[in-house]
Amino acid sequence: MSLVAVDWGTSSLRGALLDDAGNVLEEKTAPRGILTVAAGEFAAVFESVFGPWMQRPDSLCLISGMAGSRQGWVEAPYETCPAGLPDLARRLHWIEADRIAIVPGLCDERDGVPDVMRGEEVQIFGAIQLTGIATGTFVLPGTHNKWATVRDGRVTGFRTCMTGELYALLSRHSILARTLDADAPPDEPAFLRGVACAANGEGLLHNAFGARTLGLFERLSAPALASYLSGVLIGEELRTQPLQDAGDVVLIGAPALTARYVLALNTIGIDTRVLGSQATWAGAHALHQVLQDRRHL
Amino acid sequence: MSLVAVDWGTSSLRGALLDDAGNVLEEKTAPRGILTVAAGEFAAVFESVFGPWMQRPDSLCLISGMAGSRQGWVEAPYETCPAGLPDLARRLHWIEADRIAIVPGLCDERDGVPDVMRGEEVQIFGAIQLTGIATGTFVLPGTHNKWATVRDGRVTGFRTCMTGELYALLSRHSILARTLDADAPPDEPAFLRGVACAANGEGLLHNAFGARTLGLFERLSAPALASYLSGVLIGEELRTQPLQDAGDVVLIGAPALTARYVLALNTIGIDTRVLGSQATWAGAHALHQVLQDRRHL
């Protein structure tokens, strides 16, 4: 039996072909995020990208990410926290019986306000497998960052932070864009200065404006200002997390981004484990195993 | 002698003709913010809009706002806080001697990060005249809000908050724009729910995402979500102000915006005085009087 693991997000489509032991045999990426796919075209796009893999005997495909949203292939329900892998396995939304399934996202609620993730849950369960850490804090930086609390292998709750999207908006479309070079390589001292600034109690709405005035008074260069703003945002994100109870912290994401969180978390004495895309494939494999175990019972 | 008071901002140009007693004889508004004026064209635009007023004998024009910035007519220096009206009068940047002057902006610095205002300083000194409040907190909501501390008629310090710009970016250009009607009329209960949410300690980066999920789960309508987001942002702004030492609070700005701050401040038991554009003209008049008094000494 072979597993096709697919992470179908808003802006990209990634997949991996795995063997029974979870080894990655092949990977594919296509610029076919759900925003590029018209309603009714998802099956055709899937076939064009993953058709060859799906022709192998006993192929099974697990799709996570925004493909399961209202704007995706088919809307899959959210599983409510706390949730573990068996819960996801039970709530798979089958597009073709025993062949193609969409993994449900997770939802959590606090003070009457819901929170949601789609795709990150598979990465978290993969990271649990890869690190052996079944209790701790799992952080997934991206456009909408997720901070998930895991206890005994189950996600007990999580929070989304719009840090990535806000960085993009502020650095490219706000007044800050006039004095800031959003394409500059990282500047570590400027980044750490921003992280430190975020702890001053003045709030993000004020501190972000420092990335304007430090440019206006030529105290920081255009490339340094981008890193400073990134530090202000990530520092603000850290400020609002209950890190005293974090336990082990696992970061999952693109290396350029997780590196910034490692730096910022180090300033407050927190060490981290860091994983990349392998967490997605490991999560799909773990979910596949739950399905197989259940079949063998 | 007649005074032409001009507030030349980024996106609009406003002016008033005042008599010796400070009465407004006439007002003008033109869509000629500094972003629409090419370098070298400021004198011509000024003449085309205010030429007739300036032909009166002994006319004197005081220009405040972004016309004094690097992208404006001529760059005028910032006056450092603490600063009072006599300091502004001393640091006027004369474009034509005794005829047309640009009012300096103010700067303040905290922990090595400068802050700036241009134009709001005239409004604050006008509000001091109009209210008789010489010690208190003066709040000017807009794209970049200013919170100024005034002691004995002098601005002792201030902070900028990017609340207005962030609301525009989030409500029109972020993922929140997909479920939110940015052009909806205010919804007071939704606004106050957002204000209350901002006090939960979870931070703006997280709380703003609630304006996505409350829409996704159909707990708030598209029009209500706009007010909810506004409440989250203004609540966050209030959370970071040292309001326990605020003293009298004076709000200066457009009625639709100051009304929101009145509501939000009322939830924490703070009453306010509210002023509109008359503060600008009163400030220019007060500054003019300092000039005249000096001349008579």
Image: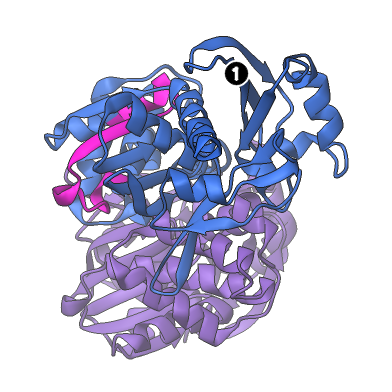
Chain colours: A blue, B purple
Residue B206 sits in quarter: bottom left
Q: Is residue B227 above or below residue A92?
A: below
Range of residues picked out in magenta:
A237-261
In front: A247, or B231?
Answer: A247
In front: B187, or B257?
Answer: B187
Residue A262 sits in quarter: top left
**Place of residue B75 in the rendered image (x, y in percent of width and height, measured from the top left):** 45, 41
For this view, does B13 lie left or right of residue A250?
right
Q: How many marks?
A: 1
Residue at the (36%, 23%) spot, across then down:
A275
What type is the residue that disc 1 sits on?
Ala
For this view, does B157 lie left or right of residue A6?
left
In front: B230, or B129?
Answer: B230
**Place of residue A16 in the rendered image (x, y in percent of width and height, measured from the top left):** 60, 18
Residue at the (17%, 29%) spot, across then down:
A271
Q: Is residue B271 above or below residue B68?
A: below
Please give the residue where the numbered disc 1 appears in the rendered image: A16
**Place of residue A252 in the rendered image (x, y in percent of width and height, measured from the top left):** 39, 30
Residue A38 lies in the magenta-colored region: no
Residue at the (27%, 42%) spot, across then down:
A137
Residue A253 lies in the magenta-colored region: yes
For this view, does B32 lie left or right of residue A139?
right
Marked residue chain, label 1: A
In front: B159, or B163?
Answer: B163
Q: Is residue A30 above or below residue A153?
A: above
Q: Secondary structure at mark 1?
A: strand
Residue B28 sits in quarter: bottom right
**Place of residue B225 in the rendered image (x, y in percent of width and height, measured from the top left):** 60, 71
Would you call the spot at circle 1 few (<14 residues within 10 Å), some (14-19), or many (20 or more)? many
